[in-house]
Amino acid sequence: MDLCRRWVLALALPALPHLPLLLFLLWGWAAPPLAKGASLAALLLLWLYGAVRLSAFPTRARRDGETARLRVLWDGRFLTIAGIYALLAQIPIWFFYPRLARWFSLPWPLVTADIAVSLLLAAALCANGVLRVLCTSKWLNLVRRVVVILLLPLPVIGLFAAWYLCRQARFEYDHGCLMEGVRRVRAESDLCATRYPILLLHGVGFRDLRHFCYWGRIPKELTRLGARLYYGNQEAWGTVEQNAADIRQRVLSILAETGSEKVNIIAHSKGGLDARYMISCLGMGAQVASLTTISTPHRGSQVIDRLVKMPDGLYRALARAVDRVFARLGDTHPDFYTASREFTTAYAAHLAQIAPDCPGVYYQSCASVMKGALSDMVLAFPYCVVKAAEGPNDGLVSVPSAVWGNFLGVFRAAGYRGISHGDVIDLRRDDYRGFDVREEYVKLVARLREMGF
């Protein structure tokens, strides 16, 4: 018999915490020593097996696409529910304790010890499940984990916190199994095998590092589906003109290496401005098939308009400090003072005049939005500032500013989370309910492939 079946647990969990008390009663049972010893040993072994099996391997594989992480996540949900059930099931038993104590002549210290043991065992079962969920979930950010941990010990409120945890685990498990099944089906496909290679351009303040990928898990997923990926390797705080020149050399080297006639460019944030300048002002329209911009401030930012009005001496001192840091990180000509001012609305209008869209290049764009300041604590303050000045945004770039060419829409997530400026490039390597960043990029590249690019 599988002791971890639901109907077995429904009957066993209310009684298992009281097995020590039952063993105490059986110890005084008038029976031959051999029979009594065998009965006690059988009960003890049964209890030990049930405890070990339930704590270590509470469930079996449920569906296709279930990975080891998802299995542990589901087990955690199962154990949390089992612990709550075991705790609630003690309430009617405690209600009848006075009568049971009189019937069996139980001393009150023993009754008190039995109640304490039942509470500890139910709490240990629940803690086992909560720990599994907290350690394996990718949908719970640090703030929510801390809040859940603080609320769980509180009476009544802790039950709601545990219910929230189980609910999130259920959604994440279902989504994870679904996406893992999709990835296994696509394992041998060439869904992202575009006609032209893809060049990924990062945003401001970052570099294409060997040991930390700016694009998170996205490149691995696209490569697995046949995409040929390259990185721009432009500077973190280079100006648009400087970075465009670096990207131009990178495009030419890619074309020479692959023998291809053109490249597809996918650019995030300022990388989109660099790419537009390169295409139109450096005569690279014939070498670029398409430009996809993600959360790029094509129309500038009113917030930056206000920030650049600070005293020029203070601004230049800040710029020198930033330039020194990024020079050590690999930038050969960092220019924070100029590059930061290229996010103003005035520069955006200037760029639109000197770098109009090239007729032979397909332009498309998309944006993302946070649903509130608490969606991303790192970007909480800039989100509020941009929200007041420009409306819905991802913590840095507003939706109207991100629109360029064929607008594909806004990336969103279910619930309160939203998708921030960093989430849209998988900077944290997290998954969010209602939004799978890897899947969205697969759709983008697959669409380029369908269009002949």
Image (cartoon, grey):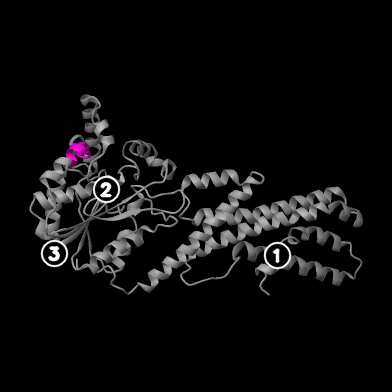
Q: Amino acid at mark 2?
A: Ala
Residue that mark 3 sits on:
257
Asked if residue 220 lies in the magenta stretch, the reply is no
Label 2: which secondary element: helix
Residue that mark 2 sits on:
402
Q: Amino acid at mark 3?
A: Glu
Residue beneath the point at 26% across and 45% down: 401
Horizontal relation, residue 333 to residue 377: left or right: left
Determine which quarter of the picture holds residue 350.
top left
Binning the other alpha carbons within 10 Å of mark 1 as few (below 14), some (14 to 19) or many (20 upward) gives: some
Binning the other alpha carbons within 10 Å of mark 3 as few (below 14), some (14 to 19) or many (20 upward) gives: few
Q: Earlier in the sequence, mark 3 or mark 2?
A: 3
**Which residue is outermost to the left?**
283
Horizontal relation, residue 186 to residue 355: left or right: right
Residue beneath the point at 19% across and 64% down: 197
Q: Amino acid at mark 1?
A: Ala
Horizontal relation, residue 421 to residue 332: left or right: right
Q: CA–CA distance between discs 1 and 2?
A: 54 Å
Q: Which of the numbered marks, if any, corresponds to residue 200?
A: none
Residue that mark 1 sits on:
10
Q: CA–CA distance between discs 3 and 2?
A: 32 Å
Instruction: Assess whether mark 2 and mark 1 are in contact (beta carbons under 8 angstroms).
Output: no
Magenta residues, start to end: 339-348
Label 3: which secondary element: helix
Where's residue 223, x and y in %? 28, 65
Label 1: which secondary element: helix
